[in-house]
Image (spheres, grey):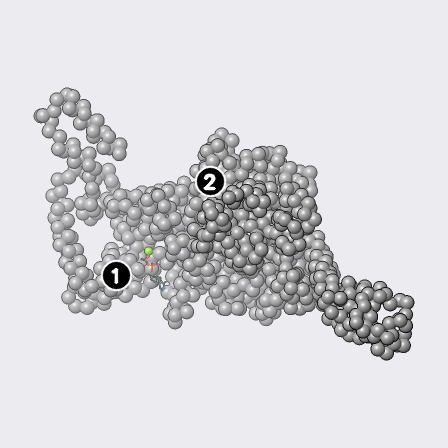
Amino acid sequence: MPDPRETPAMQQYYRFKKRYEGCILLFRIGDFYEMFDDDAVTVSKAIGLTLTQRTAGVPMAGMPFHQLETYLRKLTLKGFRVAVCEQLMEASAVKGLVPRAVTRVITPGTLVDESLLETDQRVAVAAIVPADSKNTASPARVALATIDVSTGDFFVSECLTTSAIDELARRGVRELLYIDTAERTAPAYVRDAASPLNIATLPRAAWHFRPQEALDTLITHFAVKTLAGFGLQDNEPAVLAAGALLRYVQETQTAGDDESREVAAAGATIRRGSLAHVRAPKRTDTARHLLIDAVSLRSLEVERTMRDVVMGGSAANKGGDGTLMGIFQLAPQGQGSCRTPMGRRTLREWLCMPLCERAAVEHRQTAVASLVADRTLAEQIGGVLAEIQDIARIAGRVSLARATPRDIVALAKSVRASAQLAHVIADAPALASLRTALETATRELADLPADIARLCVDEPPAHMRDGGLIRDGVDAELDEARLLERDAGSWLSAYQTRLVAEHNLPSLKVGYNKVAGYFIELPMAQAATAPVQLKRMQTLRNAERFTTPELSDFERKVTTAQARAQEREKQLFQELCDRALQLTAALATIADNVASLDATLALADKAHHRGWVRPTLTDAPALAIAQGRHPVLEEALIGSGGSCVANDTCLGSEAAALALLTGPNMAGKSTYIRQVALLTLLAHAGSFVPAASATVGMVDRIFTRIGADDALHAGQSTFMVEMIETANILHHATGRSLVILDEVGRGTSTLDGLSLAWAIVEYLAKRDDAPRTLFATHYHELTDLEERLPGKVQNLHVAVREWPQGGDHAEIVFLHRILPGKTDRSYGLHVARLAGMPKDVVSRANDVLKSLAVHTGAEASKSKRRVDTTRVSSVTETQMPLFKEYVPHPAVDALREVKLEELTPMKAFDTLRGLRDMVQD
Ligand code: ADP
Ligand code: MG
């Protein structure tokens, strides 16, 4: 039996498989895409396809061709890269092996097809390189480049290695390229940035990142002599990342030389993209942005709730319910949602990367304010925006030769609406810069939108192969083809009438059958009198058949009419696409400005609908909010008929910069401190805020350490993560930062935790330029710090109302109202009761609590354990019971067990070594 891997088709398969190393190869065979060997096994396992065998011993799995998109989506979500290998011709049209070529490479970070993208999410691919020549194995700084292939946005930046993850999260990176190493595994600095975000990593040859190669790739693509015009130095690390990244995108999106040769050899053509829409790399100017690291972005639930994060994936909560984004995204039209996908992506960017320059924020604020004030204008704008589709991504698909008929028609409509938009906002001074940009760019497009509208039908087909994109009556050649196709019958009868009249042969007939094709038929009796132009074709028993050059011409035309119509339509479509391709820069400008206007309107709608106010911005390190509400909670409560309790905040300037917030569980501490962070964030995004009034001093970073998100940090203990994050805050918070700490210290024993919390508060509050800080804690002991650090620390507590119920029980009601001063009870048992804990357990816990209180009080006073309380100056008498919880180190116990009188010098040494080992463990 011949080796099943030796057949010509399998040889062809292996050739492509080798060329697209690291990709899953989908190999078109007839109506199926097939995978073989390891690919088949891996994929069938990963997405649940049936595994079969081609011939004995070769595993195979496949999918029907029309389900390709569905499977591509599944595969890219799992992080696979996929090369789609198509048949270049129908199998019936060739003898022997069908020529094939890879027409698309789809990777998690380079998606462009509408069917594979979520409209509101950015998808980007990135490259990372060390920016630290001293230590390339574990660099202190790295450079990053990211490209969103669907829109052509290209960014570069340089940052601390530990902040790389933040930039990747903000840019929506799904795939990260790094310099291949000798060990063939991703170095730690790459893994640390990629794995918490579930980003697929991909090693690339080191020479792609070499200065000369990287620079060449960039200057060739952008047709420039140097990168200086982009504000980049030719040899800086970011350029190395950018060059290697662009090379990768070119490889996946445009036909390589091998492929082109193969296609040409088969006499076929495939169109692959040009990447004309990829814009010049822009440096992410971190100094212009309010930094919110990935951890804070998560814990503030800007894009995803903590629950989503723990449940692992956006799949759980696509709409963003419970997030800051969600209150805009999920709002009904006119109440805060954007009208276009571009607007939604921009609003996401504004919220994830707010600004920190006051003037820039005020510029946005003014635009928002103008639309809050003029609701008629707002509604007009909204109406026009609703007609605009995703210009940015359509332009991307045009440039990648993946545009559909619907894309091109939508493009024209959207551009015309954009021009109209410029007209609508003509009288709004706050929107002047948007208007100018829209006007200039739409003017650049000149006749293109009108030509598209003139040539194309209003309801275009989904695919070119369906035909019917171009209108009747706009192209003579196409009309002729269609006419022939549709009206062959009437042409024939007209022709017959003409011949009959011309030659006076009343029994002449023009006919058609499948075998003979078109013919002119005369009864045998008249055949001899046939005029000379009629060429004899076929003799039947009692009739003679003829043809004419005109008729055979007609025949040829009709039989190819359909193909010609399709071909001509394609050609016209292509011409339109090519014209659009020349205008990608103008399209990008339109897209950007439409997106800004859309996001601005969403902010204005929300402000109007929920009664938000414009915050006053100052450069002083202060924060004063009157009657602030939590924007997300408010939305949820209003939805269920309730309302959010409003609270004041005053940090910095007159008031102490650090506020300690104590109160029982479930009182609303976490909600309050998040609310302050979210309002600050909104203010920096240019938004109004849910409050009666607010003055916000510009902030350079928002730091948060809230709750436990251990699921994301597999392998590290929660407490370790808590300490790493807190250390980061203590190192990097400046006098202009806002710091939000929730229950820090909870992750360890009470005594450790309390001591740490104490020291952290002291460390932050004592600084001359203390950052504005909110610290929520259940350690009531910390409230002493207000007196110890006067003017530096203020106490806040959450009001609780108790309703005596007789006996030991008191019902408590959480008022969620934040007041100055401290509390000293934790109400844990009440919460347990509210949570539906069995009555017996609650009352037993009550008893235990009382006996413990008596016990530890008594124990503590006659405690024999020697602890140096004078050194822990912070720990007061009342906290002594806490020391009961102190668990001694096993070495201490062992030491206590040592019987000195029985020890020989040798044994003493062994014991000592044993103790030392214990301690080192
Ligand atoms: P804590 O952190 O003190 O344990 P949370 O902040 O988690 O308490 O709040 C507990 C619950 O109380 C929240 O889920 C919310 O439903 C409610 N809550 C908190 N603050 C408010 C408020 N200002 N208005 C209305 N309800 C609130
Ligand atoms: Mg809490």
Q: Which residue is mark 2?
A: 190
Question: Where is residue 255 drawn, in percent x and y?
Answer: 64, 46
Q: 441 or 80, which lies in front?
A: 80
- Work out which residue is located at the far front of the displayed protein and give it: 541
Give the quarter of the figure containing the C terminus.
top left
Q: 583 or 31, which lies in front?
A: 31
What residue is shown at x 30% (from left), y 60% (from top)?
666
Question: Where is residue 273 drawn, in percent x and y?
Answer: 64, 50
- Tell me if I can see residue 520 in this picture: no
**Horizontal relation, residue 176 to residue 266: left or right:** left
**Horizontal relation, residue 507 to residue 354: left or right:** right
Locate ligand 1 by image quadrant.
Answer: bottom left
What residue is shown at x 20% (from left), y 67% (from top)?
804
Q: Distance of mark 1 from mark 2, alpha carbons?
A: 44 Å
Disc 2 marks a residue whose amino acid type is Val
- Work out which residue is located at the far left of the displayed protein and give it: 901
Mark sitting earlier along the chain (1/2): 2
Note whether ligand 1 is within 8 Å of mark 1. Answer: no
Question: Where is residue 92 drawn, in percent x and y?
Answer: 64, 55
**Horizontal relation, residue 571 to residue 171: left or right:** right
Disc 1 marks a residue whose amino acid type is Val
Q: Which residue is mark 1?
A: 831
What residue is shown at x 70% (from left), y 48% (from top)?
267
What residue is shown at x 60% (from left), y 40% (from top)?
243
- Tell me if I can see residue 490 in this picture: yes
Q: 80 or 421, which lies in front?
A: 80
Q: Quadrant of residue 523?
A: bottom right
Q: 307 or 31, which lies in front?
A: 31
Question: Regarding mark 1 in the picture, which secondary structure is present there?
Answer: helix
Question: Where is residue 132 drawn, in percent x and y?
Answer: 50, 33
Q: Is residue 20 above or below residue 613?
A: above
Question: Regarding mark 2 in the picture, which secondary structure is present there?
Answer: helix
